[in-house]
Image (cartoon, helix red, strand yellow):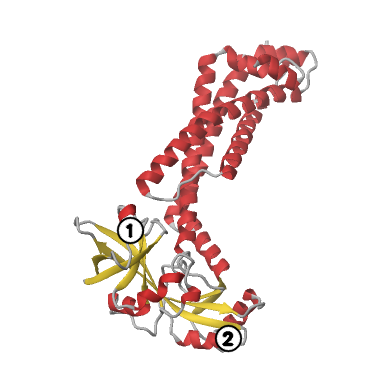
Amino acid sequence: MTALLARLLGRLPIGWLQLTHSRTRMAAALAGVAFANVLVFVQLGMMGALNGTVEMTYAPVRADILISSEDANTLTDGSPLSRRVLFQALSDPEVAAAAPFYLAKVDWSRENGSTASLNVYALPAEAARFAGPDIAGSLATLALPESAMIDERTRGADPEALAGITPQAPLRFEANGRTITATGHFSLGGGFSADGAMVVSDQTFLRLFPARIAGTPTHVLVDVTPGADAGLVAARLSDRLAGEAVQVRTMAAAQAADLSYQTTQRPTGVIFGFGVAMGVLVGLVIVYQVLSTDVADHLREYATFKAMGYPHRFFLGIVFEEAAILGAIGFVPGLILSLGIYAAMAEATALPVVMTPLRAVLVFAGTVLACAASGALATRRLRAADPADLF
């Protein structure tokens, strides 16, 4: 390793030799860097899972434009709309179609006595164009009363049993005091607010939730004519509906706003953000302590170099070398441990906790930069020091 670093640096790798001189201190520093990496990776993993579940909630439906109540911060909250909004949207010449979209939550009472919370998506049986690809082909079959499609990845359920559901082998269960017959399945998964999902027709939805009426959908889905600009149509509809308490956005804009709200204003997202910051802070403190101690232990040697005329950037180079080595080597066990934790978390929670190459690269770069920043702070004492005072 010494020879390799000497070839890369073009000089004796003083930083590497200083680190390896005290192997115990180096091992402790590497463990600290790895621990900080694990903290950051876990928090980023949970943040990524939150982002993934936000995207998943939109998967059962598709549209160019989403009309929601003005108090709807996410897809699953907000006041119901008046159905007249749908007809006003249809009056625009560049709107090709519109459909009411109903959304609520229900508890699935299992045979073993446990329950699972399900997001219930409902569309008119004839609105297949607004159904996601996994359910569009089966939406017509939901016209039968109390029929449904069930999420085969519902948390706590047997995915193989749910994947075997067919019209010939349906699953019957209780929800809101009614017997629901699942004749099909789709793949979505649980999130932070629900264990899974269910798709029904609008008529079945109204039976499940008798307090709701057909004239008050949760959202209105809108498709524009081929070649029309969805953003321009959304802006025009927003002006047209200025007298209504609604917000009109393209589906992409609505999803981005949902994600921003959940990560910056919901407690869960804020906590994960603080967790990332704390992981970075822990890494900075650990590396700073190691490097500042190393500088203090070698003050006489540094003073000798300084008296010989070596500039401050020479000392920075040595400490940055140490910082880069600690960051690069400490990252490896941190990454390996994080991969194991990700697998365990995904298995235990059924959340989409996955390591992405971009995340790994960004954390590696951040680790090296944080170590370099700690190194720069550790050399402040040398900049103003007089060699005569150091002996």
Task: Give the image quarter of residue 82.
Answer: bottom left
Q: Where's the N terminus, which quadrant?
A: top right
Amino acid type at circle 1 is Gly
Q: Is residue 16 above or below residue 328?
A: above
Q: Where's the C terminus, which quadrant?
A: top right
Residue under label 1: 164
The residue drawn where x is 59% and y is 36% is 364
Rendering coords of residue 374 (x, y %): 61, 31
Would residue 173 be visible to someone looking at this image?
A: yes
Farthest residue to the front: give it: 168
Rendering coords of residue 57 (x, y %): 45, 63
Q: Nearer the viewer, residue 111 or 90?
A: 111
The residue drawn where x is 54% and y is 30% is 332
Labels 1 and 2: the sequence-earlier one: 1
The residue drawn where x is 31% and y is 72% is 147
Q: CA distance from mark 1 to mark 2?
A: 47 Å
Tell me if label 1 and label 2 are in contact, CB under 8 Å: no
Q: Residues within 10 Å of mark 1 (few under 14, many from 20)?
A: some
Rendering coords of residue 293 (x, y %): 57, 20
Q: Is residue 312 above or below residue 185?
A: above
| Secondary structure type for disc 1 | loop
Residue under label 2: 240
